[in-house]
Image (cartoon, rainbow, N blue to C red):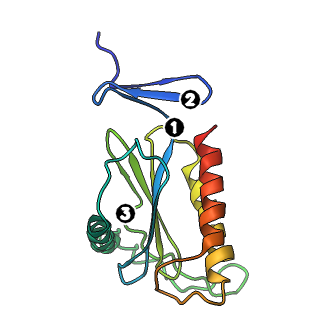
Amino acid sequence: MSLPPCVSLITHPPIHYCRHTNITFPRTVFALIIINKAGGLIYNRTFHEGGLNKISTNDYLVLAGTFHGVHAITARLSPIPTPGANRNSASSAGTMTRPEPPSGLEVLESENFRLQCFTTLTGIKFLLFTDTTQTNVDLTMRRVYEMYTDYVMKNPFYQLEMPVRCDMFDRKLLSYIREINNR
């Protein structure tokens, strides 16, 4: 009987060991990337230096554009609705319902990390790189989005679709992710 490829130990903070890579690290949020609706990189931040290989700014730009394209293709691969269902039909309360947009790629998992994507209704994509054993990633994504709306979108000096340069957003985000990584 062989050992499982990855083992989680119950400690404080929780430790995860992967025998494929011989790397031991706590459950961690590694990085955040924000991509605008045109596929351009508008924000990237690494939170844990030891988790992912360091890549150049140009590689981040390529990653953003590539992910945007793959996300668009996977959104088109969504199943076709059944012929009897009218997408803009009236609900039981008599109001029109809005159809759910196709989601595209939401989670990509490897042996060493998980990439989770949250797409807003306006097309902004938040990519969060975490340890594969990280829990409550959806809640983390929701909180990051709330901070983005509070500190970036409500900033009168921020221009849509442009790189995010808001010190308050950086500080609050870093504080929140440190709290998660130190659990």
The disc at residue 14 is: 2
Contact (CB < 8 A) between labels 1 and 3? no
Q: Residue furthest top?
A: 1
Horizontal side, residue 90 vs residue 93: left or right: left
Q: CA distance from mark 2 to mark 1?
A: 6 Å
Q: Could you tell me which secondary element the residue under label 2 belongs to?
A: loop
Location of residue 93 in the rendering, given as x and y in whole percent from the top left corner = 73, 81
Quadrant containing the C terminus is top right
Q: Is residue 35 visible?
A: yes
In the foreground, 99 or 86: 99
Location of residue 1 in the rendering, given as x and y in whole percent from the top left corner = 29, 9
The disc at residue 27 is: 1
Residue drawn at the location 60% of the way across and 55% of the way down: 140
Location of residue 41 in the rendering, given as x and y in whole percent from the top left corner = 38, 75
Q: Is residue 94 above or below residue 23?
A: below
Contact (CB < 8 A) between labels 2 and 3? no
Q: Could you tell me which secondary element the residue under label 3 belongs to?
A: loop
Horizontal side, residue 167 vs residue 22: left or right: right
Three-letter amino acid code of the residue under disc 3:
Leu
